[in-house]
Image (cartoon, helix red, strand yellow):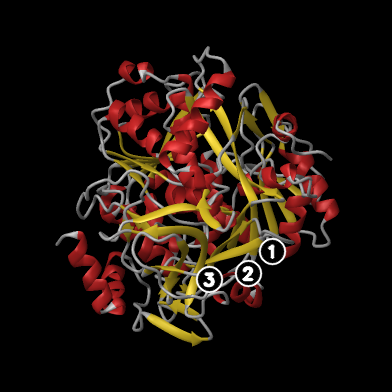
């Protein structure tokens, strides 16, 4: 069956579709009901089932005779370390760690915060929690102490599992002092902490509270997998709220198992045993879904990569890892490819490696501009799939489902909705708009398995954030359009649609034009307040590493390009060259913060910012254009 047939099958009987997909999971007690409507826009999937995530991700592969297959490949160009962990070894390590946590009092339903770098032990900690039915909350390693404290107070963990340090190119990130400070700041205090001591930095342990990773596991009885209900929270993952405290997205156990398992073959086109690599971090949703759970549930080999797309040691590190570890499917962020392209615009590094193992590449995390996709297509000669999803959904809303059928690519579009998602474009009043019209992207309820059922201890906030703007729909917060063929285009966050003299314009559309300029490696467009037109766009340009041209010539050319491609209506007259753009550690450009700087409005330093010093560079650039006065 092709994509259209499968999507139609889902539409005709959604519950039967997902019950069929559920056959790919090992159940302790099979679900009798697919969907439970709790009323008021709240739904649960497979709530009556009994299941265990760790069994499905680890033990069942050992029981099926595949214990010697590699489960995890650890590759750290920063520490010059590589190792492989088989499924049987992973089972033994996870069972022992779970046993040690249980011996210290961690039980089903208890929360455990995990504060670790990109090392296999981070996945082992996640899986050990899943084995016990404990609810883990991974916080990005190196997060500021006050941000970690907020999450400690919200999740109220019984234990915190951390590493002594993280490694960045050229520096050690001291985790333990940040953890100690966070616990000091938090009202809630964990019963104990487990510290994985890395050889690059051995941390000071606090007597009675802190335990050494290896020492506290000595002589314990390994734990078996604990059955949990289908609607038992697997984890809490905090996503930044636009105001106030971060939102604790939760994922129910059974829905996640079914959705991620279905996605591995149908979207990512891998068979059990293939090597799948998501170059992300366990602190983000991609790390949860596609470094840890998805590949392991499906019986793939997953890669834990501690490095950067450039500088560890060069722009060829991605291709080295793909060749060396025989990667079939590769997943990264568009910003990573833009960094590689900026350093190696001609793709010279790619020619140094044999990439015949690579069958497809997936991009997500922010909009993939057509120029980046074209560059990747030309140099890699495999399908480049821009797909779209969110922390809240846990897996793709829209994609080119190569495992079902490779659909034609439309540059700038993450292709078509996946089964489970009825995507519609609505105007401000909540009415559907014609094909090709820009509007708010909403998804008709219920959402499919694997998506968020609510927020941790914040049901009212869940409704207010996602369900109230368009009753009967989940509000994505993204703006875009759907064409006559059903292809979705994500143009911007709804906040990034700007109003220029009464015309609603997408900053994403302007960025697409700027990125098409041969000297531009990366760009961002923001809307700043203007007394006459309401808002005006400003473009920020990062140039290719080998560009020697006058900046003023390039800015004039991109202004002309926007006028030609979008028209005078865009009122695009201001562009400036900068060395870097402010981003989160996951690669999202902090456009909202840039707008606040331009408008001289107060703003809170984003907790997720990669390098706060970049904001001073942005402020200086804006001042040259007559903005950012304060």
Proximity of marks 2 and 1: CB atoms separated by less than 8 Å: yes
Q: Quadrant of residue 317?
A: top left
Q: Nearer the viewer, mark 3 or mark 1?
A: 3
Q: Residues within 10 Å of mark 1 (few under 14, many from 20)?
A: many
Residue 612: x %, y % from top left: 72, 36
Q: Which mark is residue 155?
A: 1
Q: Which mark is residue 49?
A: none
The answer to whether residue 186 is visible is: yes
Relative to 104, is 178 above or below?
above
Q: Are marks 2 and 3 in contact (CB under 8 Å)?
A: no
Q: Residue at x 31, y 20 (%)?
A: 353
Quick check: 292 above or below 319?
below
Identify the residue at horizontal 24%, vertical 78% (top origin): 12
Name which of mark 2 and mark 3 comes first in the sequence.
Answer: 3
Q: Is residue 534 left or right of residue 623?
A: left
| Mark 3 Cα shell of 10 Å, populated few (<14), some (14-19), many (≥20) | few
Q: Secondary structure at mark 2?
A: loop
- Provide the residue designation for mark 3: 428
Measure the C-alpha gap from mark 2 to mark 1.
Answer: 8 Å
Query: Does residue 485 appear left or right of residue 439 in this picture?
Result: left
Kindly report which numbered mark, 2 or 3, lies closer to the viewer in this rendering: 3
Q: Position of residue 391 (x, y in %)?
A: 52, 57
Q: Mark 2 sits on what residue? A: 456
Q: CA distance from mark 3 to mark 1?
A: 35 Å
- Pinpoint residue 620: horizontal percent, then vertical percent: 74, 29
The x, y position of residue 245, in whole percent, is 73, 61
Q: Is residue 447 left or right of residue 162?
A: left
């Amino acid at each position: 069956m092709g994509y259209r047939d499968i999507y139609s099958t889902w539409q005709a009987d959604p519950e039967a579709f997902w019950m069929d997909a559920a056959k790919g999971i090992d159940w302790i007690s099979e679900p009798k009901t697919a969907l439970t409507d709790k009323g008021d826009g709240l739904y649960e999937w497979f709530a009556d089932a009994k299941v265990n995530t760790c069994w499905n991700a680890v033990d069942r592969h050992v029981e099926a005779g595949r214990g010697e297959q590699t489960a995890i490949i650890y590759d750290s160009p920063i520490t010059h370390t590589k190792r492989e962990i088989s499924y049987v070894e992973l089972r033994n390590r996870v069972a022992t760690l779970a046993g040690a946590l249980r011996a210290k009092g961690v039980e089903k339903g208890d929360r455990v915060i995990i504060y670790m770098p990109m090392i296999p032990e981070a996945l082992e900690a996640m899986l050990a929690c899943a084995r016990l039915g404990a609810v883990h909350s991974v916080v990005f390693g190196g997060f500021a102490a006050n941000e970690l404290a907020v999450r400690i107070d919200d999740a109220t963990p019984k234990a915190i599992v951390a590493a002594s340090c993280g490694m960045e190119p050229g520096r050690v990130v001291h985790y333990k002092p940040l953890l100690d400070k966070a616990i000091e700041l938090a009202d809630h205090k964990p019963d104990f902490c487990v510290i994985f001591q890395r050889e690059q930095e051995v941390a000071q342990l606090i007597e009675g509270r802190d335990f050494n990773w290896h020492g506290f596991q000595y002589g314990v009885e390994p734990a078996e997998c604990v059955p949990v209900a289908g609607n038992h929270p697997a984890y809490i993952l905090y996503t930044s709220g636009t105001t106030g405290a971060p939102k604790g997205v939760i994922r129910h156990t059974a829905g996640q198992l079914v959705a991620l398992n279905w996605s591995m073959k149908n979207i990512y086109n891998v068979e059990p045993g293939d090597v799948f690599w998501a170059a992300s971090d366990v602190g983000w949703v991609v790390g949860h879904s596609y470094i840890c759970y998805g590949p392991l549930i499906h019986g793939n080999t997953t890669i834990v990569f501690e490095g950067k797309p450039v500088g560890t040691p060069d722009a060829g590190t991605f291709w080295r890892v793909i060749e060396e570890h025989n990667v079939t499917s590769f997943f990264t962020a568009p910003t990573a490819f833009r960094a590689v392209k900026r350093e190696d615009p001609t793709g010279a590094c790619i020619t140094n490696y044999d990439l015949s193992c690579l069958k497809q590449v997936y991009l997500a995390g922010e909009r993939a501009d057509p120029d980046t996709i074209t560059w990747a297509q030309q140099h890699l000669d495999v399908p480049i799939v821009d797909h779209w999803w969110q922390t809240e959904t846990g897996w793709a809303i829209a994609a080119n489902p190569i495992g079902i059928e490779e659909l034609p690519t439309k540059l700038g579009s993450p292709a078509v909705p996946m089964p489970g998602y009825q995507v519609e474009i609505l105007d401000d009043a909540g009415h559907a708009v014609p094909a090709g019209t820009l509007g708010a992207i909403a998804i008709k309820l219920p959402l499919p398995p694997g998506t968020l059922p609510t927020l941790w201890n914040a049901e009212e906030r869940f409704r207010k954030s996602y369900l109230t703007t368009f009753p009967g729909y989940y509000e994505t917060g993204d703006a875009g359009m759907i064409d006559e063929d059903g292809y979705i285009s994500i143009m911007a966050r709804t906040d990034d649609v700007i109003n220029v003299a009464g015309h609603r314009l997408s900053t994403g559309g302007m960025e697409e034009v700027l990125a098409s300029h041969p000297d531009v490696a990366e760009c961002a467009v923001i809307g700043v307040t203007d007394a006459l037109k309401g808002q005006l766009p400003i473009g920020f340009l990062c140039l290719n590493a080998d560009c020697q041209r006058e900046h003023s010539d390039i800015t004039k050319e991109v202004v002309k390009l926007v006028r030609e491609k979008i028209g005078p209506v865009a009122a695009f007259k201001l562009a400036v060259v900068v060395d870097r753009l402010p981003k989160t550690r996951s690669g999202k450009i902090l456009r909202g913060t840039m707008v606040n700087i331009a408008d001289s409005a107060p703003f809170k330093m984003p907790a997720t910012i990669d390098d706060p010093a970049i904001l001073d560079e942005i402020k200086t650039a804006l001042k040259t254009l007559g903005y950012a006065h304060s």
